[in-house]
Image: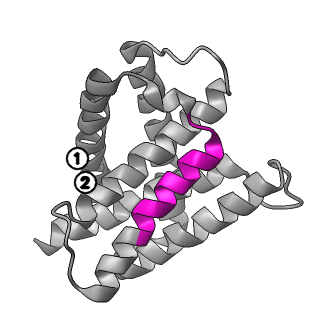
Amino acid sequence: MTNTSSQYDSIIKICRDIFVKKMKDYGSAWRILRASSITDQISIKAQRIRSIEEKGTQKIQEGVKSEFIGIVNYAIIGLIQLELGNTDKLELAIDDAISLYDKHFATAKSLMEDKNHDYGEAWRNMRISSLTDLILMKILRTKQIEDNKGATLISEGIDANYHDMINYAVFALIRLDEKK
């Protein structure tokens, strides 16, 4: 678990650095997005990963690694939006955004550690393409919950699905680094 924890922290550092740089470039323009739009952004990234995996080639320079990072960051943005809610006040100070980012990544990591304890790091035996498919499944589940106005009968909510998307994307990034 120690290795997984340090690998997870390395991925957090990469994702967080990109989030901070984009906050400096664009500010909190993402605050305009509704949860459904964020889910759709994640979907686009996951579908591109699957397309590249199936075709074995790509025409746009950015590879699957940057798409997995995008999934992590959009899922965290989704969690921040769920927490802050829709508002006309779109400005979010960079320090506040980073603090919320760190909080949600810490929650996702804690969930990962709990699940890894119970499942014995089963994800390490999975193909990266299976992690992609699990993210796509979580996206479809999230869309259904969104279409149901957040109501579920026995299932976890949108936030739980975003947490799982973060962790599956981090696992894929760890596996990609290990393949180098």
Extent of the magenta region: 33-47
Q: Is residue 38 magenta?
A: yes
Q: In which quarter of the image is the C terminus?
A: bottom left
Q: Is residue 126 at all visible to an observer of this figure?
A: no
**Mark 1–mark 2 contact, CB under 8 Å?**
yes
- Residue placed at 85% from the left, 51% from the top? 151
Q: Does the magenta stretch include residue 85?
A: no
In front: 71, or 156? 71
Q: What residue type is labelled 1?
A: Ser
Residue lying at the far front of the rendered structure: 59
x, y percentage for residue 112?
48, 55
Q: In which quarter of the image is residue 34?
A: top right
Residue identified by numbered label 1: 10
Residue identified by numbered label 2: 7
The circle on residue 80 is none
Q: In which quarter of the image is residue 19?
A: top left
- Residue placed at 40% from the left, 44% from the top? 73
Q: Is residue 140 left or right of residue 58?
A: right
- Residue placed at 29% from the left, 87% from the top? 55
- Residue placed at 16% from the left, 74% from the top? 179
